[in-house]
Amino acid sequence: MDSRTSRRQRNAPTINDVARYAGVSPMTVSRVINSEDVVKEETRKRVQKAIEALNYAPSPAARSLAGGEEMRIGLLYSNPSSSYLSEFLMGSLDRASRNNAHLVVEKFDEEMSVKNVVNHLVRGRINGVILPPPLCDSLEMLRALAAAMIPAVAVATGRTPKRMSAVSIDDEDAAYAMTRHLIALGHLRIGFIRGNPDQSASERRYQGYVRALTEAGFAVDDRLVAQGLFSYRSGLDAAEQILDLPEPPSAIFASNDDMAAATVAVAHRRGLDVPGDLTVCGFDDTSLATTIWPELTTIRQPISDMSRAAVDLLVREIRTGKMEKDGPPSHILLDYALIRRQSDAAPRRRPRKV
Amino acid sequence: MDSRTSRRQRNAPTINDVARYAGVSPMTVSRVINSEDVVKEETRKRVQKAIEALNYAPSPAARSLAGGEEMRIGLLYSNPSSSYLSEFLMGSLDRASRNNAHLVVEKFDEEMSVKNVVNHLVRGRINGVILPPPLCDSLEMLRALAAAMIPAVAVATGRTPKRMSAVSIDDEDAAYAMTRHLIALGHLRIGFIRGNPDQSASERRYQGYVRALTEAGFAVDDRLVAQGLFSYRSGLDAAEQILDLPEPPSAIFASNDDMAAATVAVAHRRGLDVPGDLTVCGFDDTSLATTIWPELTTIRQPISDMSRAAVDLLVREIRTGKMEKDGPPSHILLDYALIRRQSDAAPRRRPRKV
DNA sequence: GTTCTCTATGATAGCGTTACCATTGCGCAT
DNA sequence: ATGCGCAATGGTAACGCTATCATAGAGAAC
């Protein structure tokens, strides 16, 4: 009898259940959850297993009651490159809830003034902000945040900001790797479409391209390099320009997937087979890369991992009350990956089989 | 001395402060807050005044801990049609935080069994689930959730589920409107690319197309209708099939944007101008619609509004402890919009200008 | 061997609220 | 008077977690 001896809803496991299961005290479980480093590796593993086994999830309410600190972190985005955003959101959301922080997503429209937005954040008691591109490159925004004493973490910026922590990949190195990949395939003339000059990653990607070429002993032919803006539309123009050349390249490396997709479209319009007649590759591995046909060979950025790292970093900075001591900011560099799909191939030899 | 006698953040007043100030017990204050009617009018007034005076606001964390009504709502998604997801997330996030509910985003991979996922939800104390497409059409999932007594809200399903609330647009009507739009432009032969037959919206969209044609006195020519699967790839094949016809249509209406984009690609490959030689329109208004060139005329679904509505609905159902009484589920229908962009035009007259 | 570090873990006491039962008066029927 | 029912309020124990201090062992230094 006495069917509900407790007020617990459902019969969700609590930290005590986990503790009993793992044969430790609740406190130790708490420490594992909050990834404190004092716990012995062996114990941690045992607890982790118990958590898995019971499918335990900590109660946010209890946490904030006991911990007494409710943290609000803002995600300020401006360019809804939606596929990017959704991955980004997934990662942030995940870490935010683990860190018992509220994620407040805020859009920064063109019309708004930076000042207003920052004021809005202050009013909303936002304790810190994470900035995905292209906002991470807006000096105005960075300055305004610093002035308002709001800690921020930049994600995927090409620069390494002096006063702010950042999480990114090595754009230069990734572009270098992709270019080397094309060289290894046998391409001798490789076109390049640059990204929007306002975003710092553009320059880094171009530098990687140049370095690979130079190292391989190729000259950088300016005619093979077109300026784009990261948009599909701009990619169309850039690709036309390159393919109009009297001696067009056998491969084009675009600074992002949108422009690569545009390049594929232009090639097709001209009756060129991809990758038979032209190899095309992109950068970012957004959903567009696998939407179109052929699917794009591209550089994958671990977007959700980056946002995860960014949230963790930010939470730590807020907790330790950074801003004051101004220890040097952390810069985390995550690994990229070159994803081979169907849009690249060795160039057709000029003189076909005898 | 003893500067921090308590762990309280800020120095927000608690229910005890109010009680002391009003000269009653905390319990009475609680009753006043929760507007229970047992409190004598005079006492209530005194307490109200104390609340005013101290500017007291109850702590949500403590409330949900004690009240046991911590709400966690799950967002179960399977097909990361990322642009859809990010809009969806924005809406859900917004409402979830307003409703003091935690949003738990969960991916449902192909490999997982429905049973496992549902178990996972139960263990994770998820009180309710919202299901974006295509999961909202999975009968297996719906049944499993019902069996586990987890309330759910389907979003953008074509069906109107018997036992579950749903939020959607009128797919049939939207497709009807688009088809009428094409007819009004002067198109006489209008192709159609159907969506994945596993998703209920596909059939509804097709029905709208048929109705418009029939009403206008056109016959439905089966050769102008191709089967697609909602993927770009399938759109490529479907478009080829339709354009291979000896007498191809002057317009093609694809059941979603991905397939419309594919149709544009096929047209371009064949040297057809869009919209000059062929009008193409899509459905959904995902980011792809504005990524490609020409930008697609399409049907806009108010995705974030739909997810907002879904969360509100779900929260209300959980609060009122539905599931038991099985009052008829609510079905909310939101408005769509026909967005005209650059991919449609009047057909070229067969005999060009004398 | 004794004391003095540490390091890893445990015990205890809240965090601010509500659920549940107990208590206090008070009017009214017996 | 005595007891009863009822209205209004209070006391106490959760809720699930973390902060803080205490403690047990394992070495290290003497």
Image: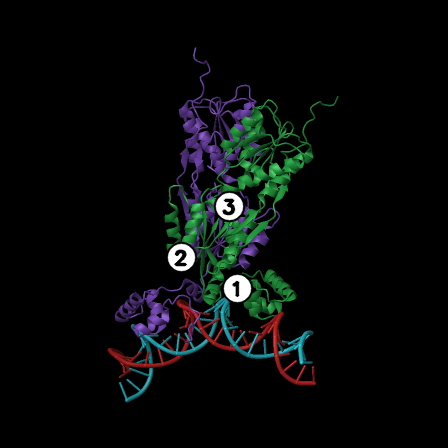
Chain colours: A green, B purple, C red, D cyan
Q: Which residue is found at the position 52% from the left and 64% from the top?
A: A11
Residue where numbered disc 2 is placed:
A125
Which element type, helix, strand or loop, lies under badge 1?
loop
Q: Quadrant of the N terminus of chain B?
A: bottom left
Q: Given the image, on which type of amino acid does mark 3 rest?
A: Ser
Seen from the viewer's position, the closer of residues A45 and B254 is: A45
The residue at the far top in this view is: B354
- Report if the CB atoms under discs 3 and 2 are less than 8 Å apart: no
Which percent across, then down, holds residue B310? 43, 48
Establish if A128 lies above or below A257.
below
Chain ID at mark 2: A
* Separation of residues labelled 3 and 1 (CA atoms): 32 Å
Residue A349 seen in this snapshot: yes
Residue where numbered disc 3 is placed:
A86
Mark 3 or mark 2, earlier in chain: 3
Q: Are marks 3 and 2 on the same chain?
A: yes
Q: Nearer the viewer, mark 3 or mark 2?
A: 2
* Separation of residues labelled 1 and 2 (CA atoms): 35 Å
Which percent across, then down, holds residue B259? 53, 33
Q: Are marks 3 and 1 on the same chain?
A: yes
Which percent across, then down, holds residue A151? 46, 55
Mark 1: give few (<14), some (14-19) or many (20+) Cα within 10 Å.
few
Q: Nearer the viewer, mark 3 or mark 1?
A: 3
Chain ID at mark 3: A
Q: Nearer the viewer, mark 1 or mark 2?
A: 2
Q: Given the image, on which type of amino acid does mark 1 rest?
A: Asn
Q: Which residue is found at the position 43% from the left and 13% from the top?
A: B353
- Mark identifier at residue A11: 1
